[in-house]
Image (cartoon, helix red, strand yellow):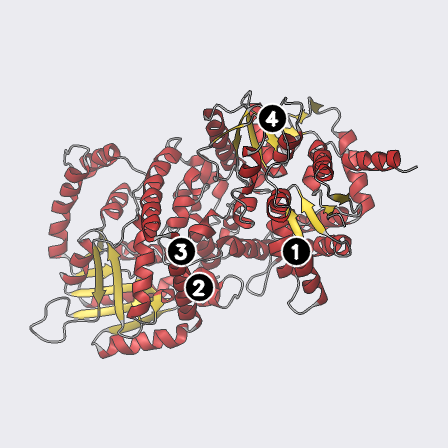
Amino acid sequence: MSQTTAPIDFRANAQRIPPKMAASVQKATAKFLGNRAALVEALGNDLWQTLRQAGHDLRLHAITHLDHYLEQAERAVTAAGGHVHWAPDAAEANRIVLTIARRHGVKKVVKSKSMATEETGLNHAMEAEGIQVIETDLGEYIVQLLGVGPAHIVVPAFHLSKEEIADLFREKLGVVADAEAERLTQVARVKLREEFLTAGLGISGGNFLIAETGTVVTVTNEGNGRMCTTIPPVHVAIVGIDKVVPDWESLTVLLKLLARSATGQKITCYTSFISGPPRSPSETGPREFHLVLLDNGRSRILGSPETRETLLCIRCGACLNICPVFNTVGGYTYGYPISGPTGMLFASQILGMQAAGGLPFASTLCGACNDICPVKIPITDILLHLRHRVVEGDEQEGAVAPAILRAGAKAGSVALRTPWLYRLGSTMLKWLQAPLARDGWISTLPPPLNRWTMARPFPAFAPDFRGWWRSRGRGRQP
Amino acid sequence: MAIQAQLFITCLAEQFFPGVLQGMVGLLERLGVQVAFPEEQTCCGQPFFNSGYQTEARELARKWLETFGRTHGFIVSPSGSCVDMVCHHYPHLFPPGTPEHRLAEETAARTFELTQFLVRQLKMTDVGARFPHKVTYHASCHLLRGLGVREEPKALLQNVRGLELVPLSTEETCCGFGGTFSVIYPEVSQAMMEAKVQSIEATGAEVVVACDAGCLMNIAGGLRKANSTVKAMHLIDVLTADRGTP
C-alpha cells in the first residue's frame, strides 16, 4: 500500500488502556444509544427500516457512479468560483493544503472537526512547517491539548470526565474552572474566539458533498464549524471522495439517518451548506474556497466487490457505540483515527494488511454493528472477507499471515473432513487429556490454548454421542 | 408420515456436550419426530470460514453437503452459529449457477436450529418440561442476529412448568467468545466474558441458558472460574431435565 506504517498491535494496545477506560466508554455510549433508540422508536421501526434501505441504496448508487458524481461536483464547485484539488493519497492532500497556506503566508490555522485530516495527519504536516494548528471542536480541542488524537469519530473526548478536563485546562491553559460542562465550554469558547479572529486559514472536513450543486455539507453541534468556514480569509475543505451524494433529495434521507444514529438527535444544531466563495462584493465569507478530494485508498476499496460497501459509511459512530469490543477497549486500541467496526474496515484497507492485518480479527462477529448501521453496511461479511485477504490473499493483496498458519489450517481441514480421521482424533484427544482433566474441566492447556485457560477452564473432551447412538441402535434392532 | 429430522450435531457439541445431543434425540422423539443421524458428518467449516480460510471452509462445506445433501426431511441442530454458517455462508462459497450452489441453497432451506424448528416448523412452544428453577437467558449472537431467532427460546422457557424466567440486562450482548477471537485477543475476550458473568450473577438466577456450544463453553468456564453457583445449561438440558434438578 502507499503508506508505510508500523504494524498496529491491537492486543498490546488493549493491554495498555487504563483500567477505568471501559466504564467511561460505556457510560458515554449508553447515553448515545439510549437517545438513538428513543428517536428510532418515535419514528417507528418500519419507517426506520425503510429509511435505512433508502440510505443504503442512495449511498451504493453514489459510490458505484462515483466518477460521474465527482466530476459533476467538480464542475459545480469550479463554476461557483471554488478550486478543486484531487489528492490521490494522504501526503498529496497535505502538500496541497500546505501549498495554499504558504501562498497566503498563513501562520495560524483553525480547524473544525475532520476525520479526513486525522487520516492524512495534516496537523503534524503543518506543524512541521511551522504553522500553528488549532482544533476548535471542543472534543478535538481537548484531545489536542492532551497531545493525542480523537478517541471516537463523533465525540473525540467522550472517554474523559469533566474533572479530567478541568484538570487539563488548569494544567495547559492555566485557567481554574469548576468541573461543569457549561463552565468548561466557556473557557474553551473564550480561548477559541481569539483564534478564529486571527487565523489565516480555516480548514473543515465535509459530511457530504452534493454533486448537483458542489455543496459541502457539515453536520455539527458547536458554532465552531461556521466560524472556521466563514471568518478566516481562506477556507479549505478536505473531503473523502466517498462522501459524494447525487442531490439534495438524497441528502434529506441521509441527514435523518446521520443525526439520529450519531448523537440521537433529530437534527444537529448546525447543518451548514458551503457552495463556494462569495459571488458578489456584498457577500461576506472567505474570498477563496478550496475543495480537496481525498482518495487515499478509496478507489482501491471500490475495486473490491466484496468490500466496497465499506464506502457507504457516513461516519455516524453507531457501530462503535454498540460494539462490545469497542466498549471494552475504547478507541485508541485500534491504532487508527477511525476506530470500532467501521475503523477496522477502513484502517485495514487503507493501510494494508502488513500494517493492519490484525484489525479484522478484533471482532467477535456478533453482528450488532450490522443491525445498527444506518446505511446497512454488511460489516461482519466485509470483515470475513478481509480476514480471507489476510490469511489467503485475494486480487487486492497477497496473504500476509505466516505460511505455517495456512499449513496448519490445511492439515486441520483435512483431518476434519475425513470422517475416520476426525473420529480417531476426537478419541485420541479424549485419552490425551486424561492427565489434565478434573471434574470435566481442564484448568491449564499448553500454548496457544493457554490463551483460553488463562481466563477460564476448558471443558473436557467427551465425544461420547456416536457410541451412545450406536449402542442405542443395537439395543433396538433384533 | 412422521416428520423426519436429520441430526446435525456440530463438532463442538459432539466434543463437549454429549448430554445435550442425547437430550435432543429424546426430545424430538418424544414429540413424534423420526430422528436420523448421518454418521459421515464432521465439522461445518465455520471455524475456518470465520478465520478467513475460505478455501478450507469450502472443502468442509463440500463434505457437509455431500453428507446432508442426499438426506430427506429437516436438518436440525442445537447450534445457531453452525446453522447460520450453512444457511448464510455456504451459498456464497460456491459460484451462483453451479450445481454446488444450488445444492447449498436447497439444503440450507431445510436446515434449522432446534428452537426455530420447534417453534416455527412444529408450531410448538410447550414441550411438557418441568424445571422449577430461576433461569435467565443469554441470546447467542448468530442465533439472534444471524438467524433472527429472538423470542423462540424464551417462548419455550416460559412454558416450562415451575420455571421462573428473569431478564438478563446484557441478554443481547456478546459473551466475548467469538471463536478464534478468544485466543487471538484473550484479554479482551476475558473482559467481555467477565462482564457477562457479572450481569448473569446480578440476576439472581440459578441457571443461565444459551443455545450454542461456543457461548456455553465460554460462559460456563467463566462461571466456574468465578466460583459462581450459577449453572450454564443448553436449552435442551432444561427442556429434558424432568427430574427438576439443574
Q: CA distance from mark 4 to mark 1?
A: 33 Å
Determine the image quadrant of residue B30: top right
Q: Are marks 4 and 2 on the same chain?
A: no
Q: Are marks 2 and 1 on the same chain?
A: no
Q: CA distance from mark 2 to mark 1?
A: 37 Å
Mark toward the viewer: 2 or 1? 1
Res. A95 in view: no
Q: Nearer the viewer, residue A230 or B164?
A: B164
Q: Which residue is mark 1?
A: B108
Q: Are marks 2 and 3 on the same chain?
A: yes
The chain carrying label 4 is B
Q: Which residue is mark 2?
A: A297
Q: CA distance from mark 3 to mark 1?
A: 28 Å
Q: CA distance from mark 2 to mark 3?
A: 36 Å
Mark toward the viewer: 3 or 1? 3
Q: Which residue is mark 4?
A: B131
Residue A12 in the image, given as x and y percentages of width and height? 48, 39
The chain carrying label 2 is A
Q: Which residue is mark 3?
A: A46
Residue drawn at x 43%, y 46% is: A334
Mark 4–mark 3 CB contact (< 8 Å): no
**Outermost right residue:** A478
